[in-house]
Image (tube, grey):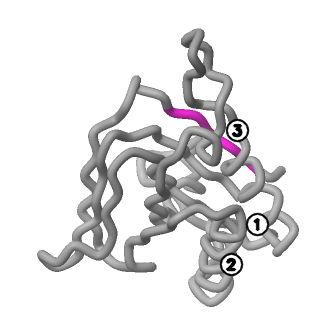
Amino acid sequence: MKVVIQRSKQASVTVDGEVTGAIEKGYVLLVGLTHSDTLEDVKYVAKKVAEIRLWEDEDGKMNRSIIEHGGDILSVSQFTLYAETKKGRRPSFIEAARPEVALPLWEAFNDQLRVYGLKVETGIFGAMMDVSLINDGPVTVIVESK
């Protein structure tokens, strides 16, 4: 499992002209799943996302989690995070989980984030989405389960 965290001041996902999820300050999460991911991977990465310290404290140091600082989550499924680009010019997505595996794990990931008291908005799994965000910082980090 691989998640790109982008700290944002505002973000939204639109599908077919309709907003499916929107947040003010918080994280935009691009969530990629591979065929070997399990519920344990989901729990590990959700805990990491909830507790990672990417927000400044009173001294200006990144010392606060989103739980401490406040903010919401916009979670977007992103199978292209597992693109293989070493050979040729066309990416291979063979390492990305098939939809029947990825969808329940993505939903479990979002539910696990809610366990930490976080409000989670989402895109639509498998849809062509327009993701809009105002990146804060910019702060962007990648969390992986393996």
Give the camera-side residue of 2 and 58: 58
Q: CA distance from mark 2 to mark 1?
A: 7 Å
**Of callouts 2 and 3, which one flags the residue occurring earlier in the amino acid sequence?**
3
Residue most extreme to the top: 59
Asked if marks 2 and 1 touch (Cβ < 8 Å), the reply is yes
Q: Which residue is mark 3?
A: 52
- Looking at the rendering, the stretch of residues picked out in magenta corresponds to 140-144
Position of residue 49 measured from the top left corner of the image (x, y, whole percent): 67, 49
Give the camera-side residue of 75 and 114: 114
Q: Hey, what amino acid is under mark 2?
A: Ala
Q: Secondary structure at mark 2?
A: helix
Q: Which residue is mark 1?
A: 42
Q: Which residue is mark 2?
A: 108
What secondary structure characterizes most of the magenta part? strand
Looking at the image, is 68 positioned above or below residue 22?
Answer: above
Position of residue 69 measured from the top left corner of the image (x, y, whole percent): 56, 39
Q: Mark 1, mark 3: which one is toward the viewer?
A: 3
Task: Classify mark 3: residues with Cα within 10 Å, few (<14), some (14-19) or many (20+).
Answer: some
Position of residue 9 measured from the top left corner of the image (x, y, whole percent): 33, 40
Q: Is residue 78 left or right of residue 101?
A: left
Q: Is residue 10 left or right of residue 104?
A: left
Q: CA distance from mark 2 to mark 3?
A: 19 Å
Q: Is residue 66 magenta?
A: no
Residue appearing at x 22%, y 73% in the figure: 19
Asked if marks 2 and 3 touch (Cβ < 8 Å), the reply is no
Q: CA distance from mark 1 to mark 3?
A: 15 Å
Q: Hey, what amino acid is under mark 3?
A: Ile
Q: Hey, what amino acid is under mark 1?
A: Val
